Amino acid sequence: MHREIGLFNSGATNLEYSVIGKGVPILLFHGGHSSCHEEFGYQRLLTSGYSIITPSRAGYGQTSPITDLGVSCHIYRSLLDHLTIEKVHVIAVSAGGPTGIAFSSMFPDRVVSFTLQCAVTKPWHAPEDKEYKLAKRIFKPETEKRTWKILAAMNNLMPKLTFRMMASSFSKLPYSEVRKRLDYHSTEAFRKMNNRQRSYSGFLIDLEQTQRDYSKELAAIQTPTLIMHSQNDSAVPLSHLENAKALIPLSEVFILDSWGHLIWIGKHAAEYDNALISFLSRQQNNMTLSTNEER
């Protein structure tokens, strides 16, 4: 896929972003340890007539490490102005959930629809949790590059074993059940993910931003919303879906019996793709009808 990389400047702040495809625009807020080079779930969107704008969120890639989520969202809106894009479908993935929630609540006039994918929607890892403490050590800016180089090297050398060792970080299922939900592409897709991931200072910003309660912002979202999740997700529990569903007025849920957090790979990926494309098409058609009626 052809990916155009840009660097947008807003005052002293840099925002790295990519644009892929031609068509109806989607603004995608990637998950943790990712950037504007993300690939999961893109191919079906592109072949279905969508273009994807992916900013590297705060602290990731070449984007400035902005800790104020509101300031970041104003810059994302300025990016849309710069690209002369009036309205977008917004997709927020995993630790990118708070960014998508904040943007959609702040700028409803720019959002056609909102989709949460295995996304954080309420306080996540607490500072006293072992996951939080470990992440603060191995993903801090001084060590994260080494962490990912070691992980990528191990994954390149032993892809199946590495997947098996890491499966419990993404799935609540025993590995015997995980295997039943994988296909022959899964191990290679996982290997490629570990080769492109970096944390920079972004994941530490994510850890702080996911301590907040976003109830007020969720309740303020007035656009149609699809909340997608795997019922076997161990990285972001299903309670995050339940929280969003309870608070977003115009929301619907889609729960997969997929292997775990990475719903874009495995035997259920096509089911995920179909549900997302169906939702986006419905909202795009509704917007077109409303525009015609106003005329």
Image (cartoon, rainbow, N blue to C red):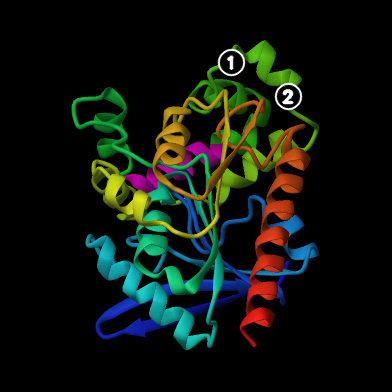
Q: Considering only vertical position in the picture, is 262 above or below 64? A: above
| Residue at left offset 28%, top offset 37% | 123
> The residue tagged with tag 2: helix, strand or loop?
loop
Decide which of 245, 209 is in the foreground and name it.
245
| Residue at left offset 74%, top offset 27% | 182
Residue that label 1 marks: 173
Q: If the image is split into quadrants, where does the N terminus sit?
A: bottom right
75 inside magenta stretch = no
Give the x, y percent position of residue 294: 61, 83
Do callouts 2 and 1 mark residues in contact (Cβ within 8 Å)?
yes
- Left-right relation of 142 to 256: left
Q: If the image is split into quadrants, where does the C terminus sit?
A: bottom right
Label 1 neighbour load within 10 Å: few <14, some 14-19, many 20+: some
Give the x, y percent position of residue 179: 71, 19
- Segment colored magenta: 142-153
Query: In terms of sequence position, does the residue under pointer 2 or pointer 1 come before the other?
Result: 1
Which quarter of the picture shows residue 163?
top right
Label 2 neighbour load within 10 Å: few <14, some 14-19, many 20+: some
Which quarter of the picture shows residue 288?
bottom right
Residue that label 2 marks: 181
> The residue tagged with tag 1: helix, strand or loop?
loop
Q: Which amino acid does label 1 sit on?
A: Leu
Does residue 273 appear in the picture of this structure? Answer: yes
- Left-right relation of 218 to 253: left
